[in-house]
Image (cartoon, rainbow, N blue to C red):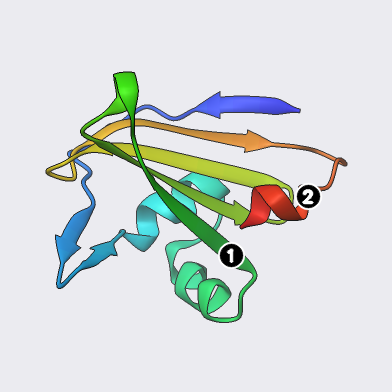
Amino acid sequence: MTETHVSSSSRQRIDFSDDAFVVDAALVGELLQLPASRVQVLMRSGRITSACERGIDEHAGEFRFSFFYGNRRARVSTDLEGRVLRKSAVDFGDRPIGGARRR
């Protein structure tokens, strides 16, 4: 298992619109090592899955978005305004990601 933290070279953010989160396919693709053009297709087919969590305790005021594809997990944490605070990706190699992790 290897973990990669990706540096933020541009002002990336997640938008909140009409009670929904809007995540740029380029950000998800960067973390999952996919072309942005494939992200929406893979999400619609259920091959990329995702989860959103609201932070508590020391992470209050933050959201964490997790994206799963194959043996990779990408995470993006934002503040309440959608500014990206942290992002990372983990490649689990030959180890499958279990169902609980793939919510």
Left-right relation of 11 to 52: left
| Residue name at image x 37 percent, y 27 percent | 7
Give the image location of residue 45, x and y in percent: 60, 81
> Where's the C terminus, which quadrant?
bottom right
Q: Label 2: which residue? A: 98
Q: Nearer the viewer, mark 1 or mark 2?
A: 2
Q: Position of residue 98 (x, y in %)?
A: 78, 49
User: What amino acid type is highlighted by mark number 2?
Assistant: Gly
The x and y percentages for residue 22 are 26, 63
Which of the 4 image quarters holds residue 21? bottom left
Q: Residue furthest top?
A: 58
Mark 1 residue element: strand
Tell me, yes or no, whether the two marked residues, 1 and 2, touch with CB atoms within 8 Å. Answer: no
Quadrant location of the N terminus in the rendered image: top right
Residue 60 image point, x, y percent: 26, 29
Query: What whole-number distance in Å separates the C-alpha atoms at marks 1 and 2?
Result: 14 Å
- Residue 103, compared with residue 87, is above or below; it is below
User: Relative to residue 101, is residue 44 depicted above or below?
Assistant: below
Q: Secondary structure at mark 2?
A: loop
Q: Residue furthest right?
A: 94
Amino acid at the residue labelled 1: Ile
In terms of depth relative to the viewer, which is nearer, 90 or 103?
103
- Which residue appears at 65% of the width and 55% of the height? 102
Q: Horizontal placement of 33 versus 95: left or right? A: left
What is the crowding at mark 1: few (fewer than 14 residues within 10 Å), some, or many (at least 20)? Answer: many
Which residue lies under the disc numbered 1? 48
Q: Residue at x 66, y 46 (%)?
A: 72
Front residue (pair 6, 75): 75
Q: Earlier in the sequence, mark 1 or mark 2?
A: 1
